[in-house]
Image (cartoon, grey):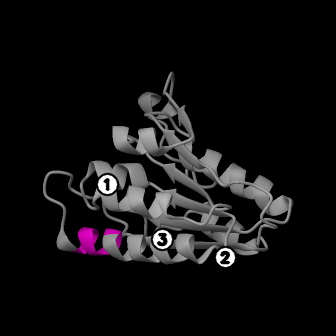
């Protein structure tokens, strides 16, 4: 746990480019290397063997949990199970953030979860604003709502310039997942 000397900020990684989750995980790797603790909650991801599930399990002071299923969520008509996963993940996120036990809390794919209206934006902002002072919160995912951007201290927009998927190269284990 942090010694109380730093102020935690809110970071947002958004945009249509590859690397938002990777940037957040890089921040976790850096922080844990300096003795900080991290908790990662992945929204809209589940039952897929993402590489970070294994590697985060090897890091000290790092926990990761998924709240979602392997299937894609229908934005126009999300299934109740997807809404339930989002709500369960958010309740866990509130517990983790408010506990103050972790220096960094990553809410992976939170932005898209909000864009799909699986959670209430104002409740998410409230949970972020009510956090203990030392807790850094990172939200990733495309389509960050303007209210989340306004609440953030740092916003990075990762844009796609070129992607191998456009040339028919499928996602590769250990690189894209």
Q: Earlier in the sequence, mark 3 or mark 1?
A: 3
Gap in angstroms between the C-alphas marked 2 and 1: 24 Å
Element under disc 3? helix
Magenta stretch containing residue 84, yes or no?
yes
Which residue is drawn at the image coordinates 52% and 44% (left, top)? Answer: 12
Which residue is drawn at the image coordinates 24% and 55% (left, top)? Answer: 117
Mark number, residue 93: 3
Position of the C terminus by quadrant:
bottom right
Q: Earlier in the sequence, mark 2 or mark 1?
A: 2
- Vertical comparison of 118 with 58: above or below: above
Observer-nearest of 24 and 70: 24
Judged left or right of residue 20, residue 109 is left
Element under disc 1? helix
Which residue is drawn at the image coordinates 37% and 66% (left, top)? Answer: 70
Residue 142 can be seen in this image: yes
Element under disc 2? loop
Query: Do callouts 3 and 1 mark residues in contact (Cβ within 8 Å)?
Result: no
Mark number, residue 121: 1
Query: Do callouts 2 and 1 mark residues in contact (Cβ within 8 Å)?
Result: no
Position of the N terminus by quadrant:
bottom right
Magenta stretch containing residue 20, yes or no?
no
Observer-nearest of 51 and 67: 67
Mark 3 crowd level (few <14, some 14–19, many ≥20, 10 Å Cα): many
Magenta part of the chain: 81-86
Q: Earlier in the sequence, mark 2 or mark 3?
A: 3
């Amino acid at each position: 746990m942090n010694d109380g000397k730093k102020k935690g900020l809110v970071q947002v990684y958004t945009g249509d480019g590859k690397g938002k989750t990777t940037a957040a995980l890089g921040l976790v790797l850096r922080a844990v290397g300096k003795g900080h603790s991290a908790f990662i909650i992945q929204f809209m991801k589940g039952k897929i063997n993402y590489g970070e599930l294994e590697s985060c399990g090897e890091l000290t002071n790092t926990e990761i949990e998924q709240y979602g299923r392997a299937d894609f969520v229908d934005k126009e008509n999300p299934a109740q199970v997807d809404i339930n996963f989002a709500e369960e993940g958010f309740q866990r996120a509130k517990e983790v953030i408010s506990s103050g036990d972790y220096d960094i809390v990553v809410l992976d794919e939170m932005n898209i979860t909000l864009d799909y209206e699986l959670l209430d934006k104002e409740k998410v902002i409230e949970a972020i604003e009510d956090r203990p002072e030392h807790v850094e919160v990172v939200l990733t995912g495309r389509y960050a709502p303007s209210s989340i951007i306004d609440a953030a201290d740092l916003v990075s927009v990762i844009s796609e310039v070129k992607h191998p998927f456009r040339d028919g190269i499928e996602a590769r284990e250990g690189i894209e997942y």
